[in-house]
Image (tube, coloured by chain):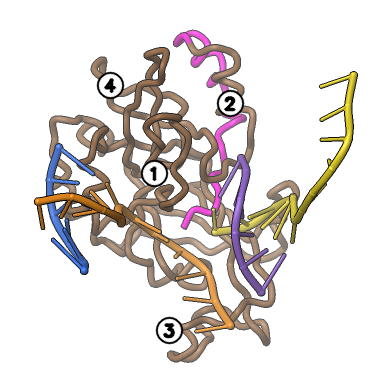
Chain colours: A brown, B orange, C blue, D yellow, E purple
Amino acid sequence: MCGAIYNVTDFPLLEPILDMAGYSESEIEKVLGKKECRPTDSVLAMVPTREGPRLMPATWWLKLDKRTLKPDTRWATFNCRSDHILTSKLHTIPPKSFRSVVVANGFFEWQPVYSGGRLFTDLTEAEQAKPPKPIRKQRYLVHTPGQLMLLGALCKHWLDEAGEPKVSTGIITLPPHPRFLDVHHKSFPLVLKPEELEDWLNPKVEHSAFEALFGVTDVRVEVEAQAVNDGDFSALDTEPFVLRPVG
DNA sequence: CCAGACGTTGTT
DNA sequence: GTCTGG
DNA sequence: CCAGACGTTGTT
DNA sequence: GTCTGG
């Protein structure tokens, strides 16, 4: 899930805002200088701090090595399954996990295309259980057109040897959305609504207050999925499809 | 008791 | 730090 | 997750 | 083909 983040590099005024907020040129470059962010890269995140929620760069890999503060790639912690949030030790070991938000233009998935041009839902039940090797993969952009995408995430606060705070983050994945199976059949990220941010980023509110969100397979925010070119992410000449909230 | 894990996705 | 497996 | 490497010896 | 790095 979320093979890459479509970063918010071109969002008007973001650079001067980060500059005014005290970020160094290199910190800003690290998170705004890339259109496509991969796991272990820096992404832009809203994280709870003693001073309240702050927008800052975060390493997109939740578990870091506590000595080097480099991603601990023994475990794939760029995603966090929603059904493990309340139970996994990963989130209670120090530093414990807090809720955060990855702010993005959208994210990319690579749609597997199987022999005969079939997509996942064209496969037999037996094939779906163990999908064959795809003959190719088609890049898709999934986004909320005209708006930033607010991806529900968890984060950890670390201190480096110089006593500087560093933040790592992982994006929360829900069970698969039935209409998204052809693009990605395993999971779908938790997309938050702006009005949910205040409680979401309040560390005094317990994770269990959001339990109802963690099993949801309906989208709650309208998102569009569009096949795009690898080079410049321009739309292919195919119809996008839209996932609309029910009701 | 100690040692070791602590995770997700996609695979033949 | 804390739970699980042996 | 995808992209990219996949190797050794001798060097400023 | 498979592992590593990001």
Q: Which residue is mark 1?
A: A170
Q: Are marks 2 and 3 in contact (CB under 8 Å)?
A: no
D8 displayed left or right of A45: right
Q: CA distance from mark 4 to mark 2?
A: 21 Å
Q: What is the chain identity of the residue bearing mark 3?
A: A
**Number of disc labels:** 4
Q: Is residue A68 above or below residue A16?
A: below
Camera-side residue: A63 or A24? A63
Name the element at disc 2. helix
The structure residue drawn at horizontal position 26% and vertical position 61%, both measured from the top left corner, is A216
Inspect the magenta stretch and tell me whether residue A215 lies in it: no
Three-letter amino acid code at disc 4?
A: Thr
Amino acid type at circle 3 is Ala
Residue at 53% in and 64% down: A241
Can you identify the residue that label 4 sits on? Answer: A49
Q: Amino acid at mark 1?
A: Gly
> What is the C-alpha distance between the residues marked 4 and 3?
43 Å
Cα gap from disc 1 to disc 4, whole angstroms:
17 Å
Question: How many other residues sit within 10 Å of disc 3, few (<14), some (14-19) or many (≥20)?
Answer: few
Query: Which residue was labeled with disc 2?
Result: A30
Mark pair 1, 2: CA separation: 18 Å
Disc 1 + disc 3, Cβ < 8 Å: no
Q: Earlier in the sequence, mark 2 or mark 3?
A: 2
4 or 2: tag closer to the N-terminus:
2
Q: Are marks 4 and 3 on the same chain?
A: yes
Q: Secondary structure at mark 1?
A: strand
Mark found first going from the N terminus, 1 or 3: 3
- Looking at the rendered structure, the secondary structure element under dot 4 is strand
Magenta span: A1-22
User: Percent position (x, y) of residue A25?
Assistant: 59, 13
